[in-house]
Amino acid sequence: MTANTRRKGGIVRQMLSYGGVSAMQTFVEFGVFAILQLIGLPFRLANTAAVFCSGAFNYVMNRNVTFKSSSNYARSIAMFVAMYCWNLLFSNLMMAWIPGLLGWSTMVVKIVTMGMQAIWGFLLCRYVIFK
């Protein structure tokens, strides 16, 4: 274990904190998405707004609480935005394709893609973005 990892509390604390932030982020993202869908916004626009809101929340919480990062702010925000652009593209593509292929609702696809993004998001944040 490196001194840097000990200072930040270790991987177990980070995983628990990331899980808590992800749970709160899920409520933010899915809540915004569901509300915008209910008022009739197309899923791509609703998803874009939801991802933007949850991304801003996620960045602040993970940088300051989970990873307690003092890394280069401009670098970390640029990398985080790049990850969220990928997440947005990925989720929009999956919500466009999967319902027609498998008959799943866009809400179910949204939940599945959010789970996948949580896994690669932790790994990227820990080892690349907030390093």
Image (tube, grey):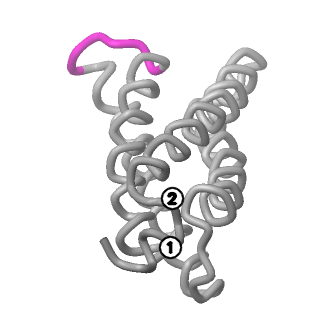
Report the number of discs: 2
36, above or below 85, in the image: above
Give the quarter of the image for residue 101: top left
Q: Residue at x 41, y 54 (%)?
A: 121
Q: Residue at x 22, y 15 (%)?
A: 102
Image quadrant holding the C terminus, namely: bottom left
Verify whether residue 103 appears in magenta. yes
Give the quarter of the image for residue 63: bottom right
Whether residue 10 sits left or right of residue 52 in the image: it is left
Q: Which residues are magenta?
A: 101-106
Q: Residue at x 70, y 28 (%)?
A: 41
Q: Residue at x 45, y 69 (%)?
A: 6
Element assignment for label 1? loop
Q: Position of residue 104 (x, y in %)?
A: 33, 13
Image quadrant holding the N terminus, namely: bottom left
Give the quarter of the image for residue 49: top right
6, above or below 19, in the image: below
Query: Could you say which disc has been placed on residue 130 in the image?
Result: 1
Amino acid carrying mark 2 in the image: Tyr
Local crowd at mark 1 within 10 Å, few (<14), some, or many (≥20)? many
Element assignment for label 2? helix
